[in-house]
Amino acid sequence: MRHGIGAGAAALLWLGTAQAMAQEPIKIVDVAELSGGGATVGTNFKNGADLAVDEINAKGGILGHKIEITHYDTQSNAGVARGLVQKAIDSEPYVIFGPGYSGSVKAVAPLFQQAQITDIMGGEAAELTKFGNPYIFRTSFGQQSSMPKVARYLHDEVKAQTVALEWVNNDFGKGGRDEITKALGEFGVKIVADISSEQGQADFSSDVAKIKAASPDAVFVYLNEDESARFLKEAQKQTLGKPLIGETTLLGQKVIDLAGSAADGVRGHIGLTTDAPVPAVQEFRRRFEARFHYVPDHNGIKGYLAPYMVKAATEKMGKLDREHLADALHGLTITPDKEPGILMEATWDKNGDIDRQSFLAEVEGGKQTIIKILPKLSK
Amino acid sequence: MTQLVQILIGGLATGAIYALIAIGFTLLWQTSQTINFAQGEFVMLPAFFVLITMSSGLPFWVAALIGVVVSALVLGVFFKKALIDPMLRHGVLPLAIATMALSIFLKESVKSFYSAEAQPFPALVPARDLHLGPVTVSLQDIATLAIAILAVALLQWFLAGTRTGRAMQATAQNPTVARILGVPVERMILLTFVINGAMVALASLLITPVYLAKFSNGDTLGLAAFIAAIVGGFNQVRGAIVGGLLLGVAENLAATYVSAQYRGALPLIILIVVILIRPQGLVGRAEERSV
Amino acid sequence: MASRFLTTAALAICALALIAAPLLLKNYGVYLLSLWTIYVIAAMGLNLMLGYAGQVSLAQGAFVGIGAYSAALLTTHGWPLGAAALFALLLSFAIGWLLGYPALRVRHHYLAFVTLAFSTLAFLVFRNEEWLTGGIYGISGVPRPSLLGLELARPIPFYEFCLAVLAIVTAAMAFMIRSPWGRAFTALRENPLRALSLGVDTRLYTLMAFAIGSALAGLAGVLYAPLVQFVDPPAFALQLSLNLLLMVIVGGQGYFFGPFLGAAVAVLLPEWLRFADNYYLVIYALVVMVLMALCPQGLIGLGERLGERLGERFRTPAAKPGASA
């Protein structure tokens, strides 16, 4: 009798704690650029993350725990970002997302190491995964991975001996320009024009005129979406007549819509895009558009992937283990058949870099067409 | 050589845009000593009025007209009555701060309540390029340049040639004496604000097809407008066109022949030089200093 | 006599509260307080230029940048923070002095635009001269200082260090304002021609106000670099100068403690408004506009007016009923 009561009590106690534990939410803090120069980047990331979190919670959460996500606004300022990451760490979350701006990521990186908290962020600068900081993870290719692919394409397929560079003068554009310069150097391709432009620039007449004067075999264009469209229109207006090669942003549907016929003939490498001919990606895009009423850019996908990365790594561990989350992510391959939220199969290496399929594409008749699929480096 | 002509044309086109925005800025300063730090956002906003009107199904032309009227009312009349009037007697600086806050308010409101994304905007002028020999001009560029010059000419005529215009000038030069002479000073100032409201709407319609409707448009445009206004001449409407065109061309020349990274520097240096050597601007009249 | 005692007591209490505050706060709160001390120092410099000498400067943020970059470059190459501070002070003073020359020729809104141009030019230099400043990538890994063997790396010791610097700067400013220099500055603001006719060397004092104000901003920058441990160009763009101007005006220009209040509003208000999610900046802007419309002398001015009104109530006794008029 007493054993029965004891067993019953123990069972109740266990159930009770399990119930309490199951109700304990997983805290995620997202530190994003919601105002200032990076507002589009951060807002897209936030929306993607919110969509993923709601989807995961609707299906029961991670190991039975619901996710609670909070967003802080860094105002696109590294000093504010640092304070906010500190604030996030103070609240003892399970994992932290962001920032998106590489400069801000650099400012906050040491904090993650000190606090031993995992960070999943959107920055693309090459050096972010070179600090030896085991807590930082990418959601898209670092520029040190994507630019060599572009350089190879320029050299092998476009057969360009001389290239002109047109880039936007912020850490995104300059980082890309530095990496492509390095990569092109290794292929022996000469850079005959190196032109920086300002964020928000509307007049590209000088840029195109200079490129024309330099007479390159091809032009590598690395600008944000709005400026890409304006550049393409100016290039059409002045009949630049050279192959225009880009990396993800230049070939987006948004740019194609804005530039119209000026976008035809543009080619390039695409790491992550809502235009990819992958059903899971198209599904994501449909759901995002239904909820937010616009088509997300690649930052939206980055934000969407982050919670699913956390889910996959936590499920691999079988428990909520904040300290070992980073270890679980290192070397992890997440496949869409096990975790559809990951959209495309991806592997994270020990530096936090991502290895994933990517595409070479061309714009024809107002649409992006995939000409080649570049497989993952590790299969 | 063709390169030079091409970038000159590009510079003139951009400069015309700066001029349009600078005109209203100059007018406001002249008549009511208001430095409107939100002028850039004033140009960003009417495009959204138009987009919102269009989303209810009205055709572009109707929406554009409504946009101009709403802009004149909100950015003209309401702005003056709600913000300027209570603050005018406190001096220039608190008003400048208030307009700084207003610019943040407008920008963040559009971002939060409408969208953080850039929206395409229909063009007043068909998108076609004219090939004049080796050089290409777009219809859009010509239209903007023509309308900017026309606007300045019309305003110039209005200010110098009509009674109301001369009353406005009197208000600008010395409101106390103007009042004594029977000029309805309050009404003149209100008129200036209404004109500014309409002008920024016009500028918005012309430039948004190129710049796209985005909440952050005000940042760069606002600064460019200030520089254009001051370099040209803060107390002459003609100054706006001179300053604007000079600015657009200087920027392009700097980007092509000096350094693309420092393309923004030449306008700033011109600004500093002009203020130090000829503070009334290139075509402005010297301002008397009260003792 | 009594009011003097009250003021000193109030100040003492505030000082104690500031020293003890970290006990009640987590790391983030301490970070915000440190940021506040830095803003106060920069804002005091601007208040000297604007509130006392009557000159508008929109370049204050650029000088914070000059100080921050100096500190970052020197300390990442092994120099102690003290030496970096000295260098930054002298550099900011010198450049501020040079920037003062335009201030001799033009006033008010013209000066605002010259300094605005300078601010944007400084940003371009910070961004483009990669060989010196690290360009758009900035300088990371700026070390926290150690003072006489004391490690100041952790949040609370570093904050107390910043607070100590603030205390020294405050005392120095108070001394200067009360000195003949301070009176000369005020004369400059009120009526420069009259001041000139009274024998005040307006040229010298104008340049002085500019140089000292800019040096203070440089000093603020020297503290900013080890606080954030990362410097990059966007942090010191025009936006910072506009924010500092906002702080001085909202706090109350020309009032000694205006910068303290104004910086507190700038740092704390976004925090208090975080509940408003995305809309917090909208509300912040609205609050500033309303404040400017209602009381352009800033918060201290508002406090003064309220104080006067209350004082009147107590001082004028109600008329006795039946007394003959």
Image (tube, coloured by chain):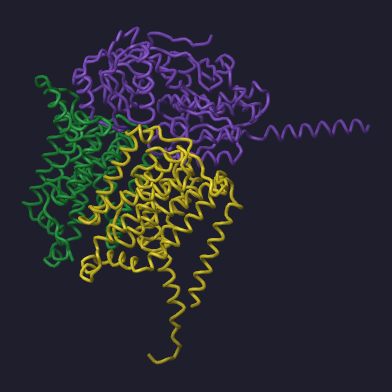
Q: Position of residue C266 (x, y in %)?
A: 43, 51
Residue toward you, C205 or A243: C205
Q: Which residue lies furthest to the left in this view?
A: B161
Which chain's colour is green? Answer: B
Q: Which quadrant would residue B2 be assigned to in this image?
A: top left
The colour with which the image depicts chain C is yellow
The picture places residue C12, in percent across and down from the top left corner, at: 54, 65
Q: Residue at x 27, y 48 (%)?
A: B75
State the image quarter where residue B81 is shown: bottom left
Residue C281 percent coordinates (x, y) = 42, 45
Question: Measured along the vertical axis of the image, is residue C7 above or below residue A238?
Answer: below
The x and y percentages for residue A238 are: 18, 20
Residue A277 in view: yes
Q: In which quarter of the image is residue C45?
A: bottom left
The purple-tinted chain is A
Specify whether residue B105 is in view. no
Residue C105 as seen in the image, left or right of residue B159: right
Q: In this view, does A327 lie to the left or right of C63?
A: right
Q: Which part of the image, by quadrant, shows the C terminus of chain C? A: bottom left
In front: A26, or C51? C51
